[in-house]
Amino acid sequence: MPQMAPMNWLTLFFMFIVIFMIFNSLNYFCFLYFPKMSSFNNKISSINWKW
């Protein structure tokens, strides 16, 4: 039935958006970042204040 085609495209669009958002959120929250704090701490400890 051609009258129901826009409804089908709308549901496919919303399903794509939901899957896209789930995929992006999983990639964002599952990424573990371990910063190298040793070099940062060495830079801070080597600063000599002059006052």
Image: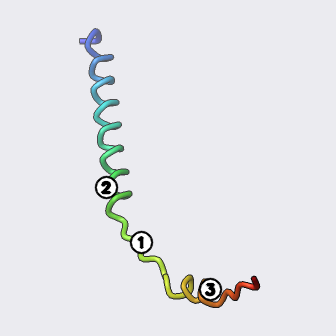
Q: CA distance from mark 2 to mark 3?
A: 35 Å
User: Residue 22: x percent and y percent?
Assistant: 30, 47
The residue carrying mark 3 is 43
* Amino acid bearing label 2: Leu
Which of the marked residues, 2 or 3, is nearer the chain's N terminus?
Answer: 2
Q: Foreground: 45 or 37?
A: 45
Q: CA distance from mark 3 to mark 1?
A: 21 Å
* Amino acid bearing label 1: Tyr
The residue carrying mark 2 is 26
Q: Foreground: 13 or 28?
A: 28
List the single residue furthest toward the front.
51
User: Residue 23: x percent and y percent?
Assistant: 33, 51
Q: Is residue 2 above or below residue 12?
A: above
The residue carrying mark 1 is 33
* Amino acid bearing label 3: Lys
Secondary structure at numbered mark 2 = helix
Q: Residue at 38%, 57% (x, y): give it.
A: 28
Give left or right: position of 8 versus 37: left
Q: Nearer the viewer, mark 1 or mark 2?
A: 1
Q: In the figure, residue 1 lies in which quadrant? A: top left
